[in-house]
């Protein structure tokens, strides 16, 4: 299983720590990647069974070449109040007045995770709101934890950085959170769960059990949410898992982060995926013919929801 070392990995981490995978007879090995885009090659050749990251241009190109990787579940999205991958601008640029609005991004160097990833579509939406085009800025692609160092060293001017790295950058004084991605691109399907072809079609029973474990964990995560923060009934439990599973050991960082949305019934926002695919096409990043409907497979989450029942908040289950 591939992760991107971001707070959106929490469904995988809860399922691992609470033994939900073990309950299903599944032994999981976790491998970190800089971005979901970098998981496509190992998913395509069966080195990974499951990945978790953005629905990238590379994913659609792989499918166009006949590699049947599937988008099978929501991993992270941006409903209002859940802007977990905000636009950050260096503090000195804000304090000097160099940055006052989105139009001031012109000429800036902006960090993202990978070319052709969903965050590039988020940036495009921000630039459009500022009257700019994608060619008006320079992009640099780094792993999310590296964004913090790049902002501190003035190697970049701004970044679209996912949590918890975004909060670390702000708390360090290096950057200012100028806009949440829930404001830039509401209800963006920013990250998804991916299944390799061999896993989905060669071991479908294991793939279904994996999804049941994952959705149990996602529901625990939803029980930890309150007004876009980890402040709900299960927040302490989830924060403990995050501090045990990530490089950030200060629980106050996770109490401060802006949480991601994640559908407790698993389905993805297909319209958002289609909008991103059109952006990739406009940037000449798509090679061949492919549509989102060919890539999305909700059969695993539908099976798991049928087994578990529709989600109800923990307060309703008492």
Image: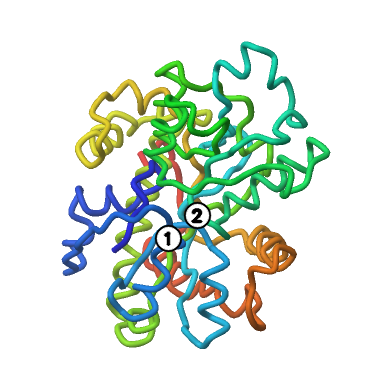
Q: Which residue corresponds to the image point at 68% horizontal and 39% vertical from the top-left?
A: 184
Nearer the observer, disc 1 or disc 2? 2
Q: Do the residues labelled 1 and 2 touch (CB within 8 Å)?
A: no
208 or 29: nearer the viewer? 29
Mark number, residue 202 = none
Q: In which quarter of the image is the C terminus?
A: top left
In this rendering, would 92 be left or right of 143? right
- Mark 2 lies on a secondary structure that is loop
Instruction: Examine the image and state in which quarter residue 294 appears.
Output: bottom right
Q: How many labels does the image show?
A: 2
Mark 2 Cα within 10 Å, few/some/many (few <14, many 20+)?
Answer: many
Image quadrant in which the N terminus is located:
bottom left
Q: Is residue 123 above or below residue 97?
A: below
* Place of residue 63 in the rendered image (x, y in percent of width and height, measured from the top left): 53, 80
Q: Is the residue 39 above or below the residue 225 in the image?
A: below
Residue on which disc 1 sits? 309
Q: How crowded is mark 1: few (under 14 residues within 10 Å), some or many (20 or more)?
A: few
Is residue 130 found left or right of 274 in the rendered image?
right
Q: Measuring 74% from the left and 28% from the top, which residue is drawn there?
A: 104
Where disc 1 sits, the SS reads: loop
Percent from the top left, x then y, of residue 245? 22, 42
Whole-percent x, y for residue 30 in the image: 23, 58
* Horizontal side, residue 23 vs residue 62: left or right: left
- Which quadrant of the figure has residue 7? top left
Compare residues 276 and 88 and report the one nearer the observer: 88
- What colour scheme was applied to this rendering of the protein? rainbow
**Residue under the image location 65 percent in, 52 percent down:** 121
The span from disc 1 to disc 2 (Cα, nearest Å) is 37 Å
Image position, residue 47 (x, y; %): 28, 75
Lower position in the chain sequence, tag 1 or tag 2? 2
Residue 114 shows which numbered tag?
Answer: 2
Q: Nearer the viewer, residue 47 or 270?
A: 47
């Amino acid at each position: 299983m591939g992760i991107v070392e971001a707070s959106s990995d929490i469904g995988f981490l809860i399922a691992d720590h609470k033994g939900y995978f073990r309950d299903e007879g599944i032994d999981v090995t976790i491998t970190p990647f800089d971005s979901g885009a970098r998981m496509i090659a190992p998913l395509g050749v069966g080195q990974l069974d499951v990945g978790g990251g953005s629905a990238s241009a590379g994913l659609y190109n792989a499918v166009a070449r006949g590699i049947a990787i599937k988008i099978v579940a929501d991993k992270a999205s941006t409903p209002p109040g859940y802007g977990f991958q905000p636009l950050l601008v260096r503090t000195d640029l804000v304090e000097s007045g160099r940055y006052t609005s989105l139009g001031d991004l012109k000429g800036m160097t902006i960090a993202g995770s990978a070319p052709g990833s969903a965050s590039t579509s988020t940036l495009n939406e921000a630039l459009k709101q500022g009257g700019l085009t994608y060619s008006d800025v320079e992009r640099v692609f780094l792993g999310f934890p590296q964004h913090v160092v790049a902002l501190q060293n003035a190697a970049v001017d701004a970044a679209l950085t996912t949590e918890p790295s975004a909060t670390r950058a702000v708390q360090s004084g290096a950057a200012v959170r100028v806009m949440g991605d829930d404001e830039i691109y509401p209800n963006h399907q920013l990250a998804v769960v991916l299944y390799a072809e061999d896993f989905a079609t060669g071991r479908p029973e294991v793939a279904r059990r994996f999804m049941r474990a994952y959705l149990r964990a996602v529901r625990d995560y939803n029980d930890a949410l309150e007004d876009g923060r980890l402040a709900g009934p299960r927040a302490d439990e989830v924060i403990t898992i995050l501090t045990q599973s990530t490089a950030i050991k200060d629980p106050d960082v996770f109490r401060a982060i802006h949480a991601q949305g994640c559908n407790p019934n698993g389905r993805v926002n297909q319209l958002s995926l289609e909008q991103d695919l059109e952006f990739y096409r406009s940037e000449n990043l798509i090679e061949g013919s492919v549509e989102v409907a060919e890539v999305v497979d909700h059969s695993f989450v539908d099976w798991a929801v049928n087994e578990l029942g529709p989600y109800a908040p923990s307060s309703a289950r008492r």
